[in-house]
Amino acid sequence: MNTSSPFQLPALPWQENALEPIISARTIGLHYGKHHATYVKKLNELVAGTRFADMPLEQVIAATVGNAEMAKIFNNAAQTWNHTFFWNCLRPNGAGEPPRKIARLIDESFGGAPQFKEKLAQAAVDQFGSGWAWLVARGGKLEVIATSNAQTPITMGATPLLAIDVWEHAYYLDYENRRPEFVKAVIDGLLNWDFALEQLEKADVRKAA
Ligand code: FE2
């Protein structure tokens, strides 16, 4: 059994100051270097010497979701996964027009890009307390959903395409209590549509296999 630290903190896809002025280097430094790093560290401590130490992260999440006795492992595993996903959902000079394939699905699913943006912003703002807002693909359509705490769409039969972290640690240093301002700035300036398209295409390949 693998008793070393099986789960690693992946490198950020950009420099810590790359998302300024929308997200400060200080926020990224703490969010990635303390919060995300701590989820990975705790997960490694919790799984040491257990069957989970030999599983891929996604399998740990699937094996522990909804099990109260496994809540600590689930929470740290899902937050490890969610944060790694989230960093890739952001990029400097992001947002803009989605790729055609996603734009078409957005039109079919929400009635247009402005309606989609509004729905994503609303889900992010309305999530009570800590959690996440997501754009997901499910059943050939796109949906906006919110999850609380560490919950993740990968346990819900959905393929996440984009995420916005709305835990206070994601925005409080830069926006204090103004979550709507943070959410709008992320949606209008940082969303990484190329990454979203990659997720959709990977899911299409899995479905076709
Ligand atoms: Fe976070």
Image (cartoon, grey):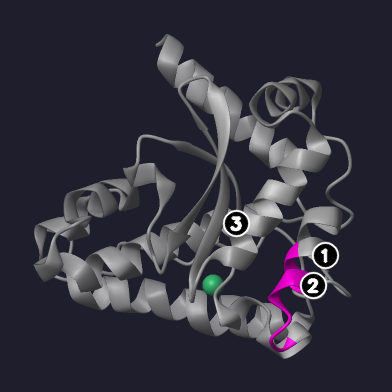
Ligand 1 within 8 Å of disc 3? The answer is no
- Residue type, numbered disc 1: Ala
Residue 125 rendering spot, x and y as whole percentages: 64, 66
Dot 1, how many residues are within 10 Å of its Cα: few (below 14), some (14-19), or many (20+)? some
Q: Is residue 192 visible?
A: no
Q: Nearer the viewer, residue 38 or 132?
A: 132
Residue at 67 percent of width and 40 percent of height: 195
Question: Which stretch appears magenta?
Answer: 176-183
Residue 73 rendering spot, x and y as whole percentages: 23, 68
Disc 1 target residue: 185
Q: Which of marks 2 and 3 is nearer the N terminus?
A: 3
Q: Indicate the secondary structure of the residue bearing disc 2.
A: helix
- Residue type, numbered disc 3: Ala
Disc 3 target residue: 123
Q: Which of 174 and 84 is in front in this view?
A: 174
Q: Indicate the secondary structure of the residue bearing disc 3.
A: helix
Disc 2 target residue: 181
